Image (cartoon, rainbow, N blue to C red):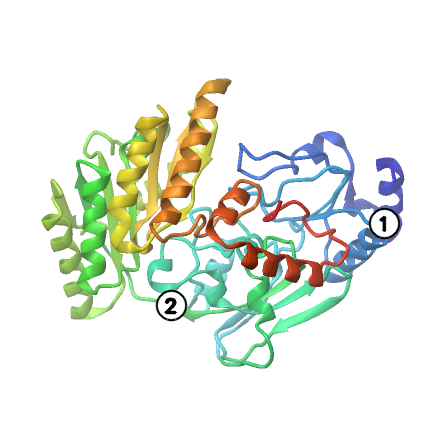
Amino acid sequence: MDSPTLVAALRRVVPAERVVDDPAVVESYLQDHAEWAEYGQAAAVVRPRGTAEVRDVVRFAVEHRIPVVPRGAGTGLSGGANAVDGCIMISFESMDSVLEIDRAERLAVVQPGVVNDDLRAACAEQGLWYPPDPASSPWSTIGGNVATNAGGLCCVKYGVTRDYVLALEVVTGRGEVVRLGRRTAKGVAGYDLCGLMVGSEGTLGVITEVTVRLRPRREPERTIAGYFDSVIAAGEAVSAVSASGVIPSALELVDRHCLEAVDAWKNMGLSTEANVVLLGRVDTPGHAGEEEARTILRCFEEAGANWAALSTDEHEAEALFDARRLAYPALERLGPVLTEDVCVPRALVPEMLARIEKAAARHDTLIANIAHAGDGNLHPLLITPIGDDAARRRAQAAFEDIIADAVELGGTVTGEHGIGLLKRGGLRCEVSHEVLEMHRAVKNALDPHGILNPGKVFV
């Protein structure tokens, strides 16, 4: 079916205004933030306003064997939401309502297009808190967070998206609407199909509604900052915090390359003071929280921090964490960024950081480092000059070396960004052939016609 015929037919399936085929508009939907990942040309973008419209689009796609690519805000970093040739892209920007917040049961029901921070703000008005907080939380959507099982700054203590998803409404690869999971605090009836959908990157079903677990609003956090001369010294401090038994509510690393990029963009003046900043937070109330903060401070000092302090200025503390969140977009201003997302055992963070530095030197590649260091989730950012193909090849080689090093250290090739397109080779390095076949069997069972986000995760 050619594109004009497909578009005309789609406009008979859903209200015509939901279907976009203007090439200039469609172009803006074709890729996520994984600048190095390939993408195709979509036949059309559909912006549904409800589950029934999503179901009808998927049924149309099943009938005509047309690929379907679900998309949230496009903040992903692995190419998981990139278009494939001839596909229908389903954008959830118009399905952005918080449908329910239940204070008694501590849960919320939302549509997939709800922005993470908007949900958090709505929960705060009810004295509740939704913990998952990826650095893209001001822009990323809950549907996208569920698709990649996103983590964030506080997941070192509070876990990742999967830990908060109670139930999902999903349109399957057969065009059926099903509800998975439950609203109760406990439940083990049948296989955990709801959990299976979380992190499946749109390859097993199209999510149209999400029920999430909430927590009571927490106490204000205490922030501890440490300045270090090297990422390896900062990594030693991370290992010391882990060994101390304290579970921080955040433990983040930002290196000099990131600080300089943020300074050049926002003029925050951080790079004049440190080569590496380590940011710790605790949210345990009362005297116990004070003791935890002092323990983290001592870990920083004993690991060789040239300056460390417990912040008494809330504005200053927020500015430091703002710099952490701004690091990626600041680096994008320097050139194409290839983003890693490896995770290693916490005790091996110093070794992994050392290997990243060696990869940078070996391949003559600029690698900046940010990390959810408290849970071993490292984000080396490989930057190349615009239009420099030789530098791009060197960076790709460094990227592959970092993946191999993470696997060798008993880690994983992705902690929260997903496999998408960029990590398909890494997945083959991490899991056995037999396990890959198990994955493929699940995919074939739930998407028998192979229309849901084809080409992602598996080659």
Q: Nearer the viewer, residue 64 or 212?
A: 64
Crowding at label 2, few (<14), some or many (≥20) Cα neighbours within 10 Å? some
Q: Are marks 1 and 2 in contact (CB under 8 Å)?
A: no
Question: Is residue 455 shown left or right of residue 401?
Answer: right
Taking the spot 72% from the left edge, 58% from the top edge, the residue there is 447
Tag 2: amino acid = Arg
Q: Name above or below for residue 25 compared with residue 49.
A: above
Q: Position of residue 360 (x, y in %)?
A: 33, 30
- Disc 2, SS: loop
Quarter of the image for residue 274 reads top left
Taking the spot 14% from the left edge, 54% from the top edge, the residue there is 299
Q: Position of residue 224 (x, y in %)?
A: 20, 52
Q: Nearer the viewer, residue 405 or 12?
A: 405
Q: Name above or below for residue 351 compared with residue 443.
A: above
Q: Position of residue 197 (x, y in %)?
A: 59, 62
Residue 64 is labelled as 1
- Disc 1, SS: helix
Taking the spot 40% from the left edge, 47% from the top edge, the residue there is 342
For marks 1 and 2, give the CA distance.
48 Å
Residue 217 is labelled as 2
Question: Is residue 416 shown left or right of residue 218?
Answer: right
Q: Name above or below for residue 408 compared with residue 336.
A: below
Q: Where, quadrant-wise, is the N terminus in this rendering?
A: top right
Q: Nearer the viewer, mark 1 or mark 2?
A: 1
Q: Where, quadrant-wise, is the C terminus in this rendering?
A: top right
Quarter of the image for residue 44 reads top right
Q: Name above or below for residue 447 compared with residue 139.
A: below
Taking the spot 13% from the left edge, 43% from the top edge, the residue there is 305
Can residue 234 be seen here? The reply is: yes
Can residue 259 be seen here? The reply is: no
Q: Position of residue 255 (x, y in %)?
A: 28, 37
